Image: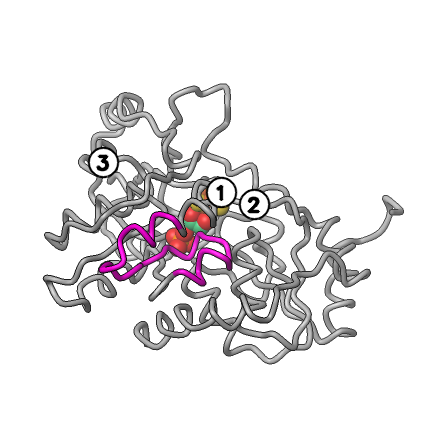
Amino acid sequence: IDDSIDLVSEINRLKQEKNAVILAHYYQKDEIQDIADVVGDSLALAQQATQLEADVFVMSGVHFMAETVKILNPSKKVLLPDMHAGCSLAESCPYDDFKLFVEAHPDHKVISYVNTSAAVKTLTDVVVTSSNARQIVESFPKDEKLIFAPDRNLGNYINSVTGRNMLLWDGACHVHEQFSLEKILDLKNQYPQAKILAHPECQRVVLNVADYIGSTLALLNYSKTSDATQFIVATESGILHEMKKASPQKEFIPAPPLDSTCGCNDCNFMKMNTLKKMYLCLKNEFPFIEIDETVRLKAEKPIRKMLEMSK
Ligand code: 13P
Ligand code: SF4
């Protein structure tokens, strides 16, 4: 495309022309967050997908997020600026293997994190996000046998705070697994007043030193309302944009990954989306999400159940 093109005004023009809305996750690049109609955590994005009136939805996030929007809006066009924007956590739970696991435990109810494929959601009783996982797990009777997939760190954390013993799928997110406890503690020595904020996808050793654990939105809200003025943030660094915007007088320090040359606190999948790709996908209405209707109907049930339980 012509380099002189003003991408932001072109995107806004196309949005109007096509009656489109842009949903973006907090891990998106700053410039994408700035032009989005809604920026949110996984739960807020799923909720908004049922509330916004539009003919076209652009989900600037990763594939499972766009799939969720399509599952909830089957007659609408759902675009993902880069179809290769996957998720290592969702990929750590392939459908065929998970089906065997579920079939091997027929007396268990299945709770799946939203970071899963639509196919995995068809094997699921209720979907959760990091915002509502605790509340939804606690809604099951204490003696109910539960499978939790795919994130072992979130599962371990929920087991520890609820006193449950859910059977965990052994999956993880490559970004959140990379945070180094040693380096976080070094930072804490440098900034002794700083609060450590961590996403529950981090390993237990990191969660153990956190002052506050929560979803991206919960971490953002904590940073806004806390009296503290410095925060060490152990999640994908995209969230720092909203944190700094909301509290310009406070200092946000991204927690370093184990190998600082790898830049691992950026999610390479989330960062695949660019303004240029956003413009092209709106212009061409491509790439778009397609889901087999049988799969969609089965995957919709546990998502709707989550939305109902999160009102
Ligand atoms: P939340 O937005 O629910 O905190 O999820 C984080 C995440 O890993 C999204 O991919
Ligand atoms: Fe998936 Fe992790 Fe990237 Fe979130 S940060 S999209 S869980 S790989």
As drawn, the label of residue 91 is 1
Residue 282 among magenta residues: no
Q: Decide: marks 2, 1 in contact (CB < 8 A)?
A: yes
> What count of labels does the image hold?
3
The three-letter code of the residue at mark 2 reads Gly
Q: CA distance from mark 1 to mark 3?
A: 21 Å
Residue type, label 3:
Arg
Image location of residue 190, percent across then percent down:
27, 24
- Disc 2: which residue: 86
Name the quarter where the C terminus is drawn: bottom left
Please say whether residue 111 is one of the residues in the magenta stretch: yes
Q: Position of residue 227 (x, y in %)?
A: 23, 51
| Quarter residue 162 falls in | bottom left
- In the picture, measured across the screen, residue 296 lies left or right of residue 302, that is right
Quadrant of the rendered structure where residue 103 is? bottom left
Within 10 Å of disc 2 (Cα), the crowding (few <14, some 14-19, many 20+) is many
| Camera-nearest residue between 230 and 106 | 106
Is 30 in front, or is 103? 103
Q: Which mark is residue 13?
A: none
On residue 204, which mark appears? 3
Query: Magenta residues, as a range?
Result: 100-123
Residue 239 visible here = no
Q: Are marks 3 and 2 in contact (CB under 8 Å)?
A: no
Respond yes or no on whether mark 2 lies under 8 Å from ligand 2.
Answer: yes
| Residue shown at 44% from the left, 43% from the top | 89
Res 182 quadrant in image: top left
The residue nearer to you, when weighing 273 against 224, is 273
Of label 1 and label 3, which has the lower sequence position?
Answer: 1
Q: Is residue 250 visible?
A: yes
Whole-percent x, y for residue 128 in the image: 34, 61
Asked which secondary structure carries label 2, the reply is: loop
Secondary structure at badge 1 equals helix
